Amino acid sequence: MTTLTQAPPAPTLSAPPKPGVFRLAASKRQRLLVPVLVVLLLGAVLVGAGVGAVAIPVPALLGIMLHKAGLTFGLAFEPQQEAVLWAIRLPRVCLGVLVGAGLGLAGASMQGLFRNPLADAGLIGISSGASLAAVATIVLEVKLLAVFAGLAAIREALGFYLLPVVAFAGACATTFLVYRISREGGRTVVASMLLVGIAINALAGAFTGLLTYVATDEQLRSITFWGLGSLGGASWPTVLRLLPFLVLPLLWLPTLGKPLNLLALGEDQAAHLGLPVARLKHQLIGLSTLAVGASVAVVGAIGFLGLIVPHLIRLVAGPDNRRVLVGSALGGAVVLVLADTLARTLVAPAELPIGILTALLGAPTFLWILLRQRRQAAR
Amino acid sequence: MFDVENVTYQTGRKTLLQQVSFRARPGELLAVVGANGAGKSTLLRLLSGDLTPTHGTVHFDGQPLAECPAPALAKRRAVLTQQHTLSLAFPVAELVMMGRYPHFQGQPSAHDHWIVDAALSTVGLSALAARSYPTLSGGEQQRAQLARVLAQVWEAQQGFLLLDEPLTGLDLHHQHHTLDIARDLVLRGFGVIAVLHDLNLAAQYADRILLLAQGQPVAYGAPAQVLTCENIHRGFQIDVQLLPHPHLSCPLIVPCPRRAV
């Protein structure tokens, strides 16, 4: 061992603790994030349930809910209002909350997994796979049934739910394909997953385009409608069928904030801190596919939501994924319920496909975020 | 204690490391030196578990490294890599707190906050605790990452620190300060394995030196044994003279390149 004849600069390791320990306090904005979003969500639900051809003001809304719970408080409402709220508005709002929360959460998870702010669930083929499967079903159904008689039994069994089931299967199949191709020597390489995702998305897009090209006019209408998304088909059975698929992602993904923070350091560095990186990747990919695949299957492909909501939350509450995940779930629900309300009231009695609205609102918002970040960086 | 026995690492047809054996003990600073591409980082990645040896074994405290449970390992040994990217703009204090993540569930305790504070003050970054990490300079980012690594094993008994070129990008003062921190840890019973480029720093601070050339060990032992003119020529293809250090009991290495004026 070398010996120092001159004393080195006083080492600070053994320095006594300072009286006041620095603590990075959560800012007011960070602390208020969840309470404010919960209030916003309640507001969005009231608006979504109350606005429309049959207006249901808040007192009537409360009256109907209390009446359903077996209580009477003298809050007046019309039977027509009750029918509209219960059979149409409420399931639709619930569907919006579930799907919006799922898309927001999956977007935040994918941005964390890929360490890339431009990622969303569409990147790994979930949406394009679902679209391809759905379009193929719309266009080829009759022909396939003619060739393979055995399919008729399946067609019969699924009935009205053929399209959602096929779309969900398509989403899972494409994601699995992207996942398998990106594995190198037993490891999922996230960077190549991104590139493989782009290639598979393009391929699925090409096949979808080909099918659209050979489609009849009537089929084209269904394809357009499906591709742009709509919550119009909402009913209690739809909500109940979607719920089991979303319970797991909605409860599990928000608990992965701490591991996702570590992933920001890089995969090796996260592993040095004891994080089971491979397991985390599987959880993130699996849960996101479940949430987005099931959502796309029921309401069609709704773009931009999963990309933008996490950015908005980060803008307000900083990069900590423990806040971003919860915030993206709540924020996604708020945005989708409000966007859906706009979609069905702007051109009433017709309805705008909601995908058009999310893109119309989303793209400028995204640009605004980008410009804002650039201004802050320049400062 | 790290026990490395006959470790060879191949990727494709290339052999990056061949027949390396050594033992890194607690209370000892081992410097790994060698030319670019000599296999120093590969060796460190084998020790940190990023890579698995093609042949040979790496044991940590008598247990094969691959069988050490990751959470327990994370509390005993920390790794400072050469990459210092962070994909999200966390404040410096939260980056350092990530070193404490293996130690708490949910929210950090007051004790964790105290350790983060102490680690930041150790690397001299207390004043920048609230700053956003990407706004730091390269050297400051490096020190912030060092603070994270220190926080991770702050209270470990016989902990281990693996440092891959911890001095790159640091000014003269902070180069020495970083190695002072390493020596303090060694005095507290830590084992430190550091990839270093400056042979004089290695001579002054290391207890043992491992010299690699083209993936093979050239010499391993005390600085005075390893850092001979002959070994250095084999490792770096450069002629040097060894002078007695004016203040320390280690050699001072002076390169004598042929074309020097």
Image: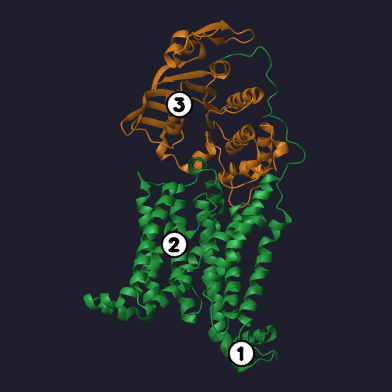
Chain colours: A green, B orange
Judged left or right of residue B257, residue A223 is left
Residue A312, above or below B237: below
- Whether residue A130 appears in this view of the structure is yes
Circles 3 and 2 on the same subunit: no
The chain holding disc 2 is: A
Horizontal and vertical percent position of residue B1: 47, 28
Residue A289's tag is 2
Residue at image point 49% right, 8% down:
B258
Depth check, front residue: A194 or B142: A194
Tag 3 and tag 2, C-beta contact below 8 Å: no
Residue found at the very far bottom of the displayed protein: A79
Circles 2 and 1 on the same subunit: yes
Circles 3 and 1 on the same subunit: no
The chain holding disc 1 is: A
Horizontal and vertical percent position of residue A45: 62, 76
Depth check, front residue: A349 or A326: A349
Name the residue tied to disc 3: B40
